[in-house]
Image: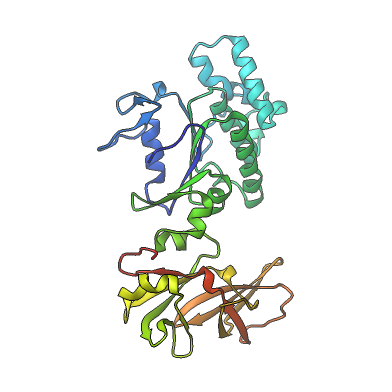
Amino acid sequence: MSIKDKEFVILVGPSGCGKSTVLRMIAGLEDITKGEIFIEDNKVNDIPPKDRDIAMVFQSYALYPHMTVFENMSFGLRLRKFSKENIKDRVQEAAKVLGISELLDRRPKQLSGGQRQRVAMGRAIVRNPKVFLFDEPLSNLDAKMRGQMRIEIKRVHQHLNTTTIYVTHDQVEAMTLADRVVVMKNGKIEQIGSPDEIYNKPATGFVAGFIGSPSMNFISCKIEKSSQGFLAKITDDIFFAIKQDKSKMLSKYANKTLLLGIRPEHISENKQNGALKIEAKLDIVEPLGMETMVYFSINNSQICGKVSPDNTIKNGKVITLYLDSLNFHFIDPKTDIVL
């Protein structure tokens, strides 16, 4: 993995996939078994954390409870023997950027979770490091505060323009904050790309299923040869012709079962050219205000679709839905590769 100067890169994946371990290795807090880490052109494998010119923001804030906000933010600078004037200027500038200037005389116990996180960020900002490392910094906050802090972090990055590596399991954070997203699974990189690439052109079934909420639907289908070309057969009643541009690629899977992936927003009551029409008996209807989620089954797989909130449908009702064939993803279940 290579991260460009001033880039905002997010490592995302399920718990235990190695995201925080990678971050801690970059910080020098974790020994590496093999490989090399470079910051600029300097190999830092054997350089201690304090000499790597990085700043890390932890999930737990890690503030000293007996110190004021000013003392917490200036602690690292005081250890490095910066002058009092320089320390004051740096802390006040960081506090201004983060909107916490009026909190400098308070102690951590007098602050909300969002304010404490700003202080932890401020402590990193005053050091003006080459690299910022964020280890799930918003996971202790409520949903509304997470949304506000996401905007804050994006704004701070645009202001400071410092290379940033950010770890989260929250895909919303990954999609909204990152220049590039690195999706990890079991200690390995599944895919690196822009949020748009990760979402619309997933490389593997794991990436396709992990990114997106609700997650992508997966339906078993059999590839069959017909007189007109190739068909994807989901059930005896649900099948469709495979378009010419994909026929050659899928021809070697004739008489084999693949997974058909389609996102919930591409299953709706809106008829489109080339859409696959189905009749679905609804198991669950979930109104969310701006949209309504509907759940039903195909081939013993639970499928989720999105319909208009104006649609007054009830559980158990049979409705007509359309699957947008332009947004189908075929996945080899043996390799997990998106074809």
Provide residue 331's location: percent of width, then percent of height: 39, 68
Examine the image and state in which quarter residue 161 appears: top right
Provide residue 312's location: percent of width, then percent of height: 72, 80
Quadrant for the N terminus, please: top left
Viewer-proximal residue among 162 and 52: 162
Examine the rendered structure and indicate whether residue 316 appears above or below residue 107: below
Q: Is residue 253 left or right of residue 319?
A: left
- Residue shown at 63%/40% (left/top)? 114
- Residue shown at 56%/53% (left/top)? 172
Provide residue 146's location: percent of width, then percent of height: 62, 47
Provide residue 19's location: percent of width, then percent of height: 41, 45
Question: Can residue 183 be spotted in the picture?
Answer: no
- Residue shown at 39%/36% (left/top)? 24
Model colouring: rainbow
Q: How many marks?
A: 0
Examine the rendered structure and indicate whether residue 111 appears above or below residue 44: below
Q: Is residue 233 left or right of residue 77?
A: left
Examine the rendered structure and indicate whether residue 9 appears above or below residue 289: above
Q: Is residue 138 left or right of residue 18?
A: right
Quadrant for the C terminus, please: bottom left
Question: Can residue 321 be spotted in the picture?
Answer: yes
Examine the rendered structure and indicate whether residue 211 appears above or below residue 301: above
Viewer-proximal residue among 336 and 25: 336
Residue lying at the far bottom of the rendered structure: 236
- Residue shown at 58%/48% (left/top)? 176
Examine the image and state in which quarter residue 35 appears: top left
Examine the image and state in which quarter residue 27 appears: top left
